[in-house]
Every structure is written in C-alpha cells, then in structure tokens.
Amino acid sequence: MKVKITVNGEVLNKHIPNDMMLLDFLRKYGIYSVKRGCDTSNCGLCTVWVEGSPVLSCSYPAARADGKIVTTLEGVQEEAQAFARFLVDEGAEQCGYCSPGLIMTVLAMGRELDHPTDEEVRQYLSGNLCRCTGYAGQMRAIRAWLDAREEKEVQACAM
C-alpha cells in the first residue's frame, strides 16, 4: 500500500506493508529518537504526535497516518532541549532511554493542559515508564518547567 505521511515537515511518499506499525515506518526512514520498548502500548517509549496528539507508535498502524502530520522529537528539538535542561537540573536523567517518549508526552501535556496539578501531571504521564528513576526527579523537573513557562507568560502579559 502507498502512504503519504508528513514527518517533521518532510513529506514521505512510500510503499509499505499493510501491517507496518508507525514505529517501524519512522525508524526505517531514519527517525531514531522513537524507541521500541514493550510493543504492547504500556511503556510510552515510542510516543510521537499525530496531528498534534500523542500516540503510541508501536500500536499505531502506519496506514492510519496516511495524509497526516507526524511529529517526533527531531521535529521539536528546541522545545525538547529546553525541557531536557530541567530534567538534568533536577537529576532526573539517568540512562535516557525513556526520555524521548517522556519528553514528547510532557510537551503535549504542556500544550493541552493549562496549569495542571501534580495529580493531573501524573495522570497524563501514566503510560510513560522509567526503569531507572523513582519519578520524583522527573516530577520536580516537570513542575519547574511548568512554573517557568507560567512565569514567562506572566512577564509577557505585563509588557
């Protein structure tokens, strides 16, 4: 089957097997930030955005992305690097394997939720597993990032 998928601004017209998952499609065409973890939609390592919403690419058929815009970590590098600094500052970065999926989910949450509580953050991130941390550092980093964004918004409104 032939698909046309826009990945990080680049249009890919490709012939694919009918049963190809989006994760495999992305990795085949050089998008290596998308990680394979569980293949059961339980770990969040493979999180990408389709039309701006986070999806687990290991269980999302590539054919379903036909005609759609897919964004990966490579497509939001500047924003991802800004959040990653908060992870590093809070000591929440260990092996880094889960980071791309976590970052994609956090950035999506930041776009979707206004001033989320810690409980809302935990609920939004419930599908992202990290085997190295106890999540405390990640939660501190997320809260610091959200607070910094709020502060920036307040300063922008005051001008």
Image: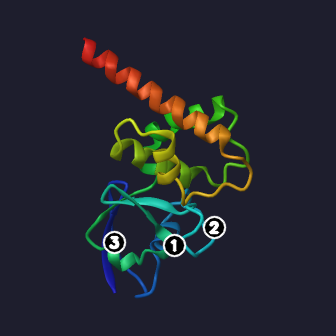
Sequence-earlier tag: 2 or 1: 2
* The furthest residue to the top: 159
Determine the residue positioned at 73% across, 44% down.
94
List x then y, in percent, for residue 26: 47, 67
**Label 1 sits on residue:** 58
Please, is residue 65 above or below residue 46 in the view? below
Q: Tell me, yes or no, if residue 73 can be seen here.
A: no
Amino acid type of the residue tagged 1 in the rendering: Cys
Q: Quadrant of residue 6?
A: bottom left
Disc 3 and disc 2: Cα gap in Å?
21 Å
SS at mark 2? Answer: loop
Q: Is residue 55 left or right of residue 86?
A: left
153 vs 98, left or right, is: left
Label 1 CA crowd tier, 10 Å (few <14, some 14–19, many 20+) = many
- The residue lying at 30 percent from left, 74 percent from top is 66
Which-is-in-front pick, marks 3 and 2?
A: 2
Q: CA distance from mark 3 to mark 1?
A: 13 Å
Are discs 2 and 1 less than 8 Å apart at CB?
yes
Amino acid type, mark 3:
Ala
Instruction: Name the residue carrying label 3.
Output: 65
How far is the residue under mark 2 from the one under mark 1?
Answer: 9 Å
